[in-house]
Image (cartoon, coloured by chain):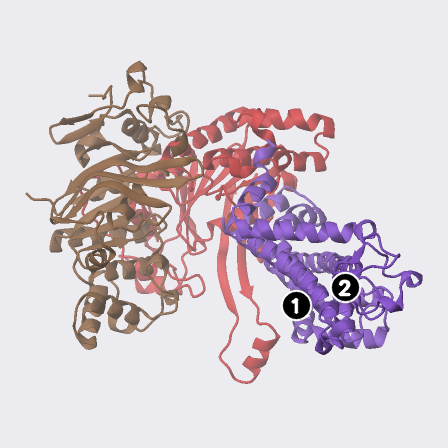
Chain colours: A purple, B red, C brown
Amino acid sequence: MNRDSPLARFARDFSESRLALAGLGLLAGVLLLALFAPWIAPQNPYDLAKLDLLDARLPPGSKAGPGLTLSMYALGTDGQGRDMLSAILYGLRVSLTVGVTSGVIALTIGALAGVLAAYLGGRFEQLLMRVVDIQLGFPAILVALILIAVLGRGTDKVIVALVTVQWAYYARTARSAALVERGKEYIEAARGLGLSPARIVLKHLLPNALPPLIVVATVQVAHAIALEATLSFLGLGLPTTEPSLGLLIANGYEYLLSGKYWISVYPGVALLATILSINLVGDQLRDVLNPRLAK
Amino acid sequence: MLSFENVSKRFVRRLDAIERLARRLGAGVSEHTVHAVDRVSFEVAKGEVVGLVGESGCGKSTVGRLACGLHEPTDGRVRFEGSKRAIQMIFQDPFASLNPRMRVQEIVGEAPRVHGLVDAKGADDYVAGLLRQVGLDPAMRSRYPHQFSGGQRARIGIARALAVQPAFLVCDEAVAALDVSIQAQVLNLFMDLRERLGLTYLFISHDLGVVRHLSDRVVVMYLGRVVESAPAAELYATPNHPYTQALLAEVPRLDRRGRDYAPIRGEIPSPLAPPPGCHFHPRCPHATARCREAAPELKQIANGRLSACHLNG
Amino acid sequence: MSAVLAVEGLVTEFSTREGILRAVDEVSFSLAKGEILGLVGESGSGKTVTGFSILGLVDPPGLVASGSVRLGGEELVGAPEEQLRRVRGKRIAMIFQDPMMTLNPVLSIETQMVETVLAHERVGKAAARERAIEALGRVGIASPAERLSQYPHQFSGGMRQRVAIAIALLHRPEVIVADEPTTALDVTVQGQILFEMQRLARESGTALVWITHDLAVVAGLADRVCVMYAGRIVEAGAVGQVLDAPMHPYTRGLLDSVPAAAAPGARLHSIRGSTPSLARLPAGCAFRERCEKADDACASQPPANDREGRRVRCHHPLC
């Protein structure tokens, strides 16, 4: 029986693209690295006591000091003597946490708002959609910058800014999907059977409006990570004590021209791999979920 | 058991803020009103099967939804002897009428559980019993809709309606999407259920042959209005209203070979702009000046027969 | 009488996850000038795929695997796309169930019809326009010159289908394949279109393949009928003979299932079971599991039985 559940069918359809499977594999790898960073990183990059300034700006492959579990700095060190590999692993963790957390919160808020708008219609829907339109009219980076300026710095403030920027996409997509589903006869049947509006929205409308939202979510999480990286690069993002990939790139920027590329480039590669894998998975999700929607 | 008293339903597409502004500035934007149902009155007695026929734009689907309470009438009253749940609808599209993400067990069992007709423990057996009643194997109740054929999905829809123990079923083109051989099976099921459960039906369809087979009485609609109503056999034998006559003449029949078609002229007008007076006059071979000016009343022309045509007097 | 369209042993296969499925399994029939052939079947019978196969419109994962389709002597199966394009629209045309499969919603009718004319003939635009107006008139559209400049959304469903038919008629093709063109239309509109098609076949000698599930339409319109089941033609013959004295149990079952066949209120006869999926066809006769007359002999493919211009594929024909 489980073989033919919507989930099993979806898994089969998804696996048809090798590129997407590769993307999924890469994404899984990135996630695992981030998850287990504290255990696999050769060094704790936040422990200032362990850092040796004399080891600063060493190229990849240099012999490591005593503070490392490995015998060499695999990817070199940065301006403070931090092992790049460890910094990148922790940075991935931070970037992903912030990106996924803000994505999930924005998804929840946006999906509920959009589905409610579709179900209730009328003034509520008009009002909500105008708010969404206005919100989407502003460039994301501008809104984020203004919010950070107003709220101040800090991880939670950055998440608030990212949620504010993203929820509107989810709301708009959720509303369209819910509108399509609302016209279908099974919703009319649910009404005729006397089910409460709350039950109809949560049990019938929302689950069927979910597929396009998942596609939006993958793209949006990638955007959120990129946006956070931009903010950090500009010095307005997360606190410097817990650097994300963006901050790492920013820190290494000044060394690029003097040939010490590894301080910027490797974090950049990690960021690229993350966003690329998310996009590959998202592309296949879109293809798989859409033709089924058309049915 | 069900009665429509001068019921009208209009769908108005209101102008939004921008369009109102445009109109103020002189643009020719106006509200669109669809007169889906126009002063319709009829009754369905307990235990009866009333067939409702008509073509696109006649309003029969809207009438069905008004009967079930899915729409509210703009004018007039819809009276039903029984709770809102006692009247259930069977839908046309076997694909869209079932929630694709719910198992059959849930689809059929959700409403009775929510309304306390059965508790969580008894739900399983209750659903199994219902599925058997509609001719499905109860072992399939943990499957999803897409794993069933069109005819099986139609039966699931019927089981879902029966789960809340209705007294009245409104079938809105319930067999239109099915193949002939499956259609016959589902029609037989409707007739069985009528006998076994004492159900009353409002059977909405564009298929005159199916309606004739199932119905005690038939109501014919055109562009939102009832044009004729009569016992089934009489309607098909001696149709009174020119539209009913044309409709019956046009229906292809197995015994008419190599026909020379002589169709009625013109198209069905849009419900947005129905013709004045009698809606059918532009296409009617017997139209007079009076037909253009005044809409005919639905009058009794014989025992149990009503017709809305000036030619009757 | 030489056939204007001769289909012989047509086989169309689809590659799916469940294997190679034969949607059209050795279908053969022929069509004379001015003849109307009804191709009848329920969903999954392969009738639509047959229509598409004749015009070479089957896309991957489908493929016309073998057989022959001769249009006035010209072989279409396996012909290069260039040749098919010359023939489509000019000598053989198709009408679909949804007129929007023919019509482009963003182009005016005039643009689309003139384009179709110019695709096959070198005439001036004005001449093409005249042809378009004449074709619209032939399908019963009032004030054709004015309606020419309109867009599809300005026409009702029935009118759109007439426009699609008019486009099919522009080059006065020898054969028109019509795939359920009136199924989605109202009864009165259907009557009008059937009237036009009948007049067309009589006046201009266009041969018609009318694909439908509705036996009653075939009864009124067609000269001959082929009944399809699971990709095979199970019975073929003149309309009167097949409908009055069907030889195949499936045809008999279909005729008996129609509401008009039973007294009002009585139980309808129904064929038990449902159409098997093409991936799980029984060995031998595809209809065995639903047939009252089936026995062990039916485990082998039934032979084609030709008798007095009628053909049936059954081990136990009814007469």
The answer to whether any part of residue C144 appears in the image is yes
Indicate the amino acid at tag 1: Met
Seen at 26% across and 64% down, the residue is: C141
Residue extending farthest to the bottom is B25
Seen at 73% across and 33% down, the residue is: B116
Q: Earlier in the sequence, mark 1 or mark 2?
A: 2
Residue extending farthest to the front is A63
Measure how far apart labels 1 and 2 are at the Cα level.
50 Å
Indicate the amino acid at tag 2: Gly
Residue A52 relative to residue C85: left or right: right
Seen at 75% across and 66% down, the residue is: A59
The answer to whether any part of residue B100 appears in the image is no
Q: Which residue is mark 1?
A: A129
Chain to which the residue tagged by mark 2 belongs: A
Element carrying mark 1: helix
Q: Quick check: C4 above or below B286?
A: above
Image x and y of residue A222, in percent: 67, 62
Q: Quick check: C74 above or below C277?
A: below
Image x and y of residue C283, in percent: 34, 23
Image x and y of residue A103, in percent: 72, 59
Image x and y of residue C186, in percent: 35, 51
Q: Which residue is mark 2?
A: A76
Residue extending farthest to the right is A49
Nearer the observer, B304 or C288: C288
Chain to which the residue tagged by mark 1 belongs: A
Residue C213's disc is: none
